[in-house]
Image (cartoon, coloured by chain):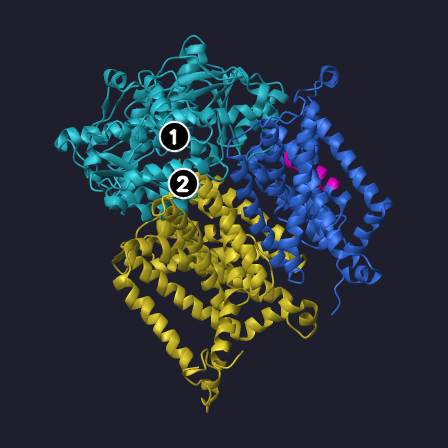
Chain colours: A cyan, B blue, C yellow
Amino acid sequence: MKWFLQALIGMLLAGVASIATAQNEQFIPVLSYRIGPYAAGGSGYFGGAIDYWTLVNLNGGINGVKIVWEECETEYNASRGVECYERLKTRHGGASTVEPLSTGIAYGLFERVANDKIPMTTNGYGLAIAADGRVFPWVFPLGTTYWDQAAAMIAYLGQKAGGEANLKGKKIVFMYHDSAYGKEPIPVFDALSARDGFELTKIPLTPPATTQESQWLQVRQLKPDYVILWGYGVMNPVALKTAAKLGYPRDHILGVWWAASEEDVIPAGDAAKGYVAAAFSAHGTNFPVMQEIVKKVYGGGKGNLEDKARIGSIYHTRGITYAIMITEAIRQAQNHFGKGKVMSPEQVRWGLEHLDLSEARLKELGASGLFPPVKTSCSDHEGSGMVKFEQWDGKEFKSLTPFMAGDRALTKKMVEEGAAKYAGEKKITPRDCSKEG
Amino acid sequence: MQFFFEVLIGGLLSGVMYSLVALGFVLIYKASGVFNFAQGSLVFFAALTFVGLMERGLPFGFALLVTLLAMILLGLLIERFVLRPLVNQPQISLFMATIGLSFLIEGLAQLLWGANVRGLDIGIQDEPLAWIAEPTGINVSKFDLAAAGIAAVLVTMLALFFSRTRIGRALRAVADDHQAALAVGIPLQQIWAIVWAVAGFVALVAGLLWGARNGVQFALTFVALKALPVLILGGFDSIPGAIVGGLIIGATEKLAEVYLGPFVGGGIEGWFPYVLALVFLLVRPEGLFGEKIIRRI
Amino acid sequence: MLYREAGQFKSTYAADSAILPIRQDRIGLALILIVAFVVVPLTASPYLFSALLIPCLILALAALGLNLLTGYAGQLSLGTAAFMAVGAFMSYNFILRIPGIPLLLAFAGGGVTAAAVGILFGLPSLRIRGFYLAVATLAAQFFILWCLTKVGWFTNYNPSGVITAQPMVILGYAFDTPQEKYLLVLSIVTVMALAAKNMVRGNIGRQWMAIRDMDVAAEVIGIRPMRAKLLAFAVSSFYCGVAGALFAYAYLGTVEPEAYNLDLSFRILFMIIIGGVGTVLGAFLGSAFIVLLPIALNIGVAFLDNTLHLNVPTSVGSNLELMVFGGLIIFFLIVEPHGLARIWQITKEKLRLWPFPY
C-alpha cells in the first residue's frame, strides 16, 4: 500500500500546485502502456520521461514554462492508441508532440498527425524512410532508425572480424519477430549482404514464440558465425535459453535494442551471459542528470517508478533520453519564437527540425555520454544514427564499444529512395529544404 | 537422421509442457462442463505469486505452500461467485464469463505484484545432459526431462485420485451426469470446489515450470492458446488425451516448422497445430479420447 | 404507458408483415435515424466521431455478422477478426489493381472474398460442433493472418508490410473529414442492418434458427444443413469483410494484419454476448457497451486523478481498468445472460403496463 502514502503526499502537493496558473503550460500527452505483455518496458520508458519532466518543472520549467502531461492507457493496441490520441490532443491547450512507443499505433497516427499538424516522434523505432523530412514533415524517428542500427550491427561484426571485408563468406542468421517491426531492417541486411559477401539466412519467429526449439535446431544445423536477434517481448529470453540449451554460444548472438534490456535477459538467468546487444543510450545512475533525478525527484517523493531498483535501468534511461530531446527541441523553438512563451505544435516541429544537441550542451545538461549528440535538419529527421554495443555479464550490461555508426551513406541513399517511392505513391510533393528557414 | 531425432525429442518435450496447461482445462471441463479460458491467467497468477513471495524473502517450500493455499482459495472464490450464479446457463455464457474472469485475474496479479519481469529458478538447469549428448550428439535438456518427469508424476497422481479415492469417484460421477449424481447424494457444490482447487494446483505446477522456462511475465497467459489444439486433439474431457495430444502437437509442430517451414517462408508454428487438430476433428469430431456426444431428438 | 400501442389493426398482408408493426416503434426508429443522420453530424465534436462513433458503428457491423453466425445459426466462431482482415486487404487490392473501381464495389468485393474464405473455413462445421468448432475457427484466425503477412502480393510487396489505405472517393467526392466518414459508415451500416433484419425474418433466418436449436430435427424436416450452415458462414463473413474494410479505410487509415488479432475476435464475441445473442439490436447495444466501457474507465481513472487529486499511480489505474472490465462482463452475464437487448425488451414490457406492476 505504498501508493497510499504517495497519494497523501500527492494530494498535499497537488493542492498547492492547483493554485498555479494553467496558462503557462506546455502539454505533452503520454500514450503509455502499463498493462499487457510489454508493460515492463512501457512503465520504465514513460516513467523515465515523466521523471525528467518533473525535474525540469522543479528546476523552473523551460524558461518558466512548465511541462504538463496526461497519461492514457493504450495497452499497445492500435485502435486504443488512436482513441487516446484523439481524446488528448485538444486538452490543456493542445498537444505539442506525441510519442506512442509502438509501431502499430505510430502507423495508425501517421496521417492523423499530418492532418492535425502535431509532430510525432518515433524514438528508436518506426518507419526508417520517415527520416527524410522532406516527405514526412510531421514524423521524427529521433536518434537512430532501424536501418542505421542494422548497418551499425554489420559494421560492429565487421570490426570483430578485423574489417568489413573479412565478413565475406561468413554466415549470419537473422532471427526476427514476424511482423512489420521484424521485417523493417531486411532491405539493409540484404544490401549489405550483397556488398560484403556474407550469407544471410532469415528465420522468422511467430510471436509470442514461447518455444523456439525448431528455429534454434535449424541454427545448429546451419552453424552460423553470428545470429542477429530482432525480437520483442518474451521471445527474447526464450531465444537465449533455447540457444543455451542447444549449445549455441551466446556471445555470438547480437540483439536489437528492443531485445536488450534487463527485462529481456534476467528471465534467462545464466543462459544470457555473454549476450551482446545494441543500445542507443547508456544506462545507470552515474550521470549528473540521473543523480539529480534521484535526489530531487525521488527524494521529494515525486518519482514515477514504483520499484526504486529500476532507476537507471535501460528503459528508464531511454525514457529520460527521449524527454531530454523533446525538452531541448521546445527550448530551441523558444529561442527562435520567443522565450518563456508556450510553443504551438508547429513551433515545436520547427524545434524538432532544428535540434542541435551538441556534446557541449549534453555536458551542460549533465547527460554527457548518456546518448550521442543529435543534430536534425529538414532533410534529416533522425539526427544521430549512432549505436553502441553492450554485453550482459550476468548482473548488468557492460559497454563494449563507444557510440559508432555503420554505413550511413548507404542507408541515407536507401532512405531517400524509399521516401521518394512513398511520395510518388501517395502523390506528396516533397518539401524543398533550401527554401525553408 | 540425428537431426530428425533431435527435433522430435525437442518437440515431444515441449509438448509435455503444453499438456501440463491442458490438464487444468480438462479437469474443469470434465467435472463441470465449463471451458475455463481463465486457466492461462491462473498459471500466470500462480507463478507471479510464488515469485513475489520468494522476493519478499520466504523460503522455497514455504512460498510454495502459501501459493498453493492462495490458488485453492482463488479456486473456491471463483466457483462460489462466478460459477454458482451461472449454473444453468448455456455453455457460451460460461465461456465468456471465464474470459472476463481471465481479465480480472490478470489485472489482480499485476496489481498485487507489479509488472516487472522476473526470472524463476527452481533449481534445475536448462542444459544438455552430457551422458546423452556425448555419444549421440543429441541435446536433451535436463530441465525438459525434469518437466516430463513431473508431468508423469502429476498424471499418475491424478489418475490414482480419480480411480481409487471416494472423492475421485464422486468427481467422475458428476462428470457423467449431474442430475444422477445429485440423486445419489453427491454434494455438487463441494465437488466443484474441489475440482477448482485441484485445477489451481495443476496451474501452480504448470506456472512454476513455464515460469522457470520463459521467465514470469505477462506472456505466460499466452500458453493457454498453445494448449487449445492439444485439447481439441485429445478431447476436452480426457486426461490421457491431454498427454497424448500434447505429445502429438508438440512433435508435429516442431517437425513441420523445420521441414515444411522453409518452403513457405517459415513461421508456420502459429497455425499448424490448429490446422492439424482441425483435420483430426474431421475424422474424429470429439477428439482422440473425447467422450462421444450422442444427441437425441 | 403514456401512449397506447393497442388498437392498431392491419388490413393487408403487407402491413401485417412489416418489420415494425407498431406505429410508435416506427416513430421511434425514425427519430433515431434523424438524430443519427442529421443532429449528430451537426453537433458532435471530431473526437466523438473519429474515436467513438465510427468504431462503434463498424464493430457493430462486424458483431452483426457474428450474431448471424453464432446467434441465429448456432455456429460458434472465434475467427471474426481474420475475416475482417480478408475484407480489408482484398478491398485494398481491388482499389489498387483495378483503377477506377467504385469504392462501394471494392468494399463489396472485399466482402465477397471474405465470404468465400468463410465458406472454406466453415466446411468443418458440417462435422464439428460446439467448442470444438470454436477452437477450429481459431485455425482460420491464425492461418489467415499468417497468410496476409507472408504472401507479399496482399501488401503490394511493401517492405515494411504496412500499407496506408487509399482515400475514399465516390463519384469524385472525397470522404476525408470525420463527419463525412461517419455519414458514409452510417449509411452502409444502416442498409446492411436492414438487410440482416429481413434475412432473419425470412426463410433463411428460420432455417438458421432451426439448425441452431436442433439440427438433427431440422435435417429431418427437410432443411439442408450444408446449405444453411455454409450460407450462414458466407453471409456472416461478408458482413465481417465489409466491416473490416471500413475499419481500415474509415477508422485506422492503415491496413495491417496486427490490428485484426485474436483480441479483436474476442471483443466482438463479447459484444454479441453482452448485447444479446440472436438479436439484431444486440449487436449495436453490445458494440456501444464494449467500445465505450474501456474509455469510460480510463476517463474515470483520470477523473479520480485530476479532479479528486487522488494521485493514483497509473499502473494501478490501468490494472483497475482491466479488473473492472472483467468484473463487469461477469456481472452482466450473471444478471442478464440474454444481454442488453433482453433488458431493453423487458423495459418496454414494463413500460406498457406502467404504472401497474410488471
**How far separated are the C-alphas under marks 1 and 2?**
34 Å
Label disc, if present, on residue A315 of the rendered structure: none
Identified at 75% across, 51% down, the residue is B290
Dot 2 amino acid type: Gly
Quarter holding the C terminus of chain C? Answer: bottom right
Magenta-colored span: B243-254
* Crowd around label 2: few <14 · some 14–19 · many ≥20 (10 Å): many
Query: Disc 1 or 2, which lies upstream in sequence?
Result: 2
Location of residue A151 with respect to C21 vertically, above or below: above
In the rendered image, residue A119 lying in the magenta stretch gets the answer no
Query: What secondary structure is found at the residue carrying circle 2?
Result: helix
Secondary structure mostly seen in magenta is: helix
Question: Would you identify the image quadrant in which residue A51 lies?
Answer: top left
Instruction: Name the residue beneath numbered marker 1.
Output: A301
Residue A189 percent coordinates (x, y): 42, 24
Report whether C204 appears left or right of B4: left
Identified at 48% across, 15% down, the residue is A169
Identified at 55% across, 62% down, the residue is C69
Residue A225 seen:
no
Residue A421 seen:
yes
Residues C162 and B103: in front is: B103
Residue A68 percent coordinates (x, y): 28, 38
